[in-house]
């Protein structure tokens, strides 16, 4: 990520970071304001998606929610969230009551990182 872009969260960049900041900068063409907007949007969307998932009983709607979250995660470089979504999609196609705990943990990690990034 370019030096004019967001500062990295101390000790949490590189391949182990929950958000790939290079991918984020690429997808936003290095526009810092856009980076901030899409990160805020992801935080909001991911939280509402998890809430909807916990209350939704229709397996097709649940699958759509996970698929949408996967796309959003990929757009900001949240690789772990996208990977968990992809694995969950596969399980959801086999059973209607696939557990989402791993997804909740991945989203929480990404959102904590985003919060630290935006306030740090």
Image (cartoon, helix red, strand yellow):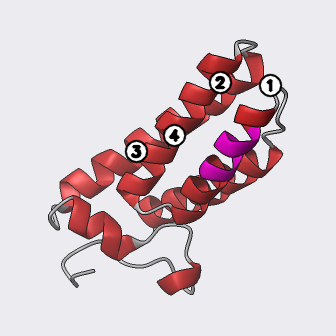
Residue 95, compared with residue 3, is above or below; it is: above
Q: Are marks 2 and 1 in contact (CB under 8 Å)?
A: yes
Nearest to the observer: residue 58 or residue 77: 58
The residue located at (59%, 81%) in the rendering is 16
Q: Are marks 1 and 3 in contact (CB under 8 Å)?
A: no
For label 1, the SS is loop
Image position, residue 54 (x, y; %): 76, 24
The residue located at (78%, 51%) in the rendering is 102
Q: Which residue is mark 4?
A: 69
Q: Which residues are magenta?
A: 86-91
Left or right for 75, reference 58: left
Counting residues from the N terminus, which is met first, the one under dot 2 or under dot 4? Answer: 2
Residue 53, compared with residue 40, is above or below; it is: above
For label 3, the SS is helix
Counting residues from the N terminus, which is met first, the one under dot 4 or under dot 1? Answer: 4
Q: Main secondary structure of the magenta part?
A: helix
Q: Are marks 4 and 1 in contact (CB under 8 Å)?
A: no
Q: Which residue is mark 3?
A: 40
Q: Are marks 2 and 3 in contact (CB under 8 Å)?
A: no
Which label was assigned to residue 85? none
Counting residues from the N terminus, which is met first, the one under dot 2 or under dot 3? Answer: 3
> Which quarter of the figure is the N terminus placed in?
bottom left
For label 4, the SS is helix
Q: Which residue is mark 1?
A: 96
């Amino acid at each position: 990520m370019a030096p004019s872009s967001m500062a990295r969260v101390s000790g949490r960049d590189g391949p182990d970071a929950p958000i790939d900041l290079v991918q984020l900068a690429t997808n936003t063409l290095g526009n810092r304001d856009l980076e901030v907007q899409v990160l805020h949007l992801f935080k909001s969307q991911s939280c509402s998606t998890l809430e909807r998932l916990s209350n939704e009983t229709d397996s097709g709607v649940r699958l759509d929610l996970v698929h949408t979250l996967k796309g959003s995660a990929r757009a900001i470089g949240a690789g772990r969230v996208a990977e968990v979504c992809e694995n969950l999609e596969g399980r959801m196609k086999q059973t209607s009551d696939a557990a989402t705990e791993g997804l909740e943990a991945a989203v929480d990690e990404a959102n904590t990182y985003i919060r630290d990034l935006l306030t740090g």
